[in-house]
Image (spheres, grey):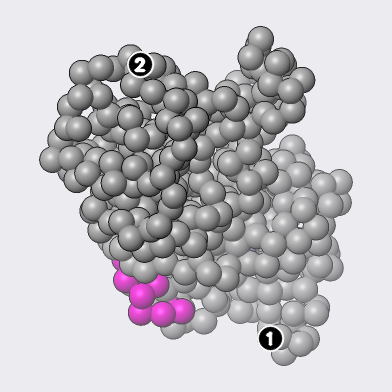
Amino acid sequence: MEPVRITVFDTTLRDGEQSPGCSMNVEEKLRLAQQLDRLGVDVIEAGFPISSEGDFKAVQAIANSVRRPIITALARTCREDIERAWEALRGATHPRIHIFLATSDIHLQYKLRISREQCLDQARSAIFLAKSLCDDVEFSPEDATRTDPEFLCQVIQAVVDAGATTVNIPDTVGFTTPAEFSGLIQTIRRKVDGIESATISVHCHNDLGMAVANSLAAIDAGARQVECTINGIGERAGNAALEEIVMAMRVRHDRYAYDSGVVSQQLFPTSQMLTEITKVAVQPNKAIIGRNAFAHEAGIHQDGVLKNPLTYEIMTPQSVGVPDNRLVLGKHSGRHALGLRCAELGFQFERRELDEVYRRFVILADKIKNVEDYHLLQLIRESRPQPARVPPSPAKTVPLALAASATAAYSTPECATLPTSFHTSNSSPATQGELLLHSPGEHHYEEDYLWGV
Ligand code: KIV
Ligand code: ZN
């Protein structure tokens, strides 16, 4: 049987950006949107145009230049919001207006102070208005999982009848459970006439740590679009993590026979770019893209992995774009290795640009033991204020020196607290032992080693 294709809707630039410390400027949003395009997501939610002039400009810039995916923007049910969203989106090749309105009694009573009838009317009229501007219209009944299911089905019926093409079911406060959410999706499919004319989407928050499990349960129950964010960033405890959903469907394809258009090798570079832009570090043990996700500390585990990685690894680091962790960059490394690592991180440099990065690298490498990826990202930022990323090249094994431990050398929390310039750092010089680890004798790229030293 053909695997079912799931639409991946990325909301890093909208719901993700709403999380503390994650706001991005227009240039940063555009850069990340271009990377999301390379990642292969189907829909990019670029922002909430009515919320600020900056967000309007970011949505407009993305709509006018990122051509393959659907570009969507959020709006409340009022005319001003919808027209502003459309104004920002109108240059897109594939525009979508995304309208939301809370439907739970608790939100109607305390937040919106409207009746259920008024809620139904507002939802219906908003879809009519949006449809007069754009064919592709999504509706989200906010706080759906705490809404009376009967009323929820009435609202969904109204928006489907009005022409909504996607109906998104948000677990706004991260309250539901996999079995309950699966049941809700099945109820909607059973009770709403003509629901087949719309795509059912889900949007889960992680307050109880079940966002990914809830999303997968909903997909099993018939949802065909999943809304998620890179690194799982988002309001409060975050949204369902895109990388976890995609890799669960890939690694456990026997159980989740679904496909996505995501290029898994772009997961790590995308995560790194987001960390670099927001300076919000990823927890080291974060699934798929955390610093320790492929690191093995215990002797028994190291022994097993060295004999056969399958003993303790259910996917390869390369499959999610994690650079080969055996490539250790230190004071004896040459430009070839540096250029390769930069490419793995998503930066392809011309020779002259690499010269500048290398010049700074040598100064830093003279002061510290190993130059890790977060150091490199800072160096790159300093040498080229607004670097244009390209798809990273596949990780290669360069036998410069084998690290004593297989600990991965990528994204770390220190990223947020690095000094602005390495040149003034007072790191102590490497010890003799450290130098031995990277002695030139071990270097297999003699020419490269000499080039530029
Ligand atoms: O969590 C939520 O309910 C939302 C909606 C706007 C989709 O983010
Ligand atoms: Zn949300």
Left or right placement of residue 376 versus residue 151 in this view: left
User: In front here: 247 or 451?
Assistant: 451
Q: Position of residue 250 (x, y in %)?
A: 62, 27
Residue 36 is marked as none
Residue 439, visible in the rendered structure: yes
Q: Which amino acid does the dot numbered 2 rest on?
A: Gly
User: In front here: 27 or 426?
Assistant: 426
Q: How far is mark 2 from mark 1, CA to CA?
A: 71 Å
Residue 154, visible in the rendered structure: no
Name the secondary structure under disc 1: helix
> Which image quadrant shows ligand 2?
bottom right
Left or right placement of residue 319 versus residue 174 in this view: left
Residue 441 is marked as 2
Q: Please give the residue where the numbered disc 1 appears in the rendered image.
A: 112
Q: How crowded is mark 1: few (under 14 residues within 10 Å), some or many (20 or more)?
A: some
Name the secondary structure under disc 2: helix
Q: Which contiguous range is marked in magenta?
A: 50-60
Q: Which amino acid does the dot numbered 1 rest on?
A: Leu
**Residue ranking furthest to the top:** 307
Q: Residue drawn at (50%, 41%), measured in percent from left and top?
A: 410
Q: Position of residue 79 (x, y in %)?
A: 46, 81
